[in-house]
Amino acid sequence: MSKTVSEIMTREPITVSPETSLESAIKILADNQLSGLPVINAQGDLVGVISETDLTWQATGVDTPPYIMFLDSVIYLQNPAKHNQEIHKALGQTVAEAMSDRPITVTESQLVKEAARIMHEKKVRRLPVVNAQSKLVGMITQGDVIRMMAAE
């Protein structure tokens, strides 16, 4: 696994904008048999990733966070801000409302071994690949890594 990410990544990946409707993003994912898409703003900056996991909120909804009542007060046992974020994601209509806005990235010069380790540790199936100017140049997936291993 001494190859670099740029040698096996998918160049010019399909992208969506934050304003793309979730309906359109779902169709793009299904039509292209993808599990996630990088999200690019009008300036061409990577601002997030929308994945199947993000979209399952649409189907599953949000559970009420655990709480206890004490002296006529509600005390949440989890962070209520997180619950509000989950509600916003579940009811969202655009990619911006459902995407993960802190994408984990790798650079095109990193070794595939490093990218594979990051995917394993962070439990993600894909990573956006950025250049020295932090612009999206590709995507690397677990499938890319497996195909490389099979070819060696």
Image: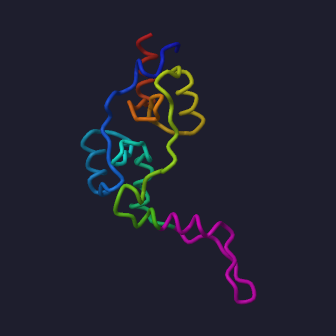
**30 w.r.t. 130: above or below:** below
Q: Is residue 66 magenta?
A: yes
**Residue 77 belongs to the span the image colors magenta:** yes
- Residue at far top of view: 152
Query: Residue 68's x, y, as percent?
Result: 70, 78
Residue 95: where, in percent of width, then height? Answer: 37, 55
Q: Could you tell whether 45 is left or right of 117 in the image?
A: left
Percent of width and height locating residue 101: 48, 50
| Residue sitting at x 26%, y 49% | 27
Q: Residue at x 45, y 10 (%)?
A: 152
User: Magenta segment, which residues?
Assistant: 63-87
Q: Residue extending furthest right?
A: 71
Q: Residue 137, relative to residue 94: is it above or below?
A: above
Q: Is 85 placed left or right of 40 in the picture?
A: right
82, above or below 112, in the image: below
- How many numbered discs sit on the rendered protein? 0
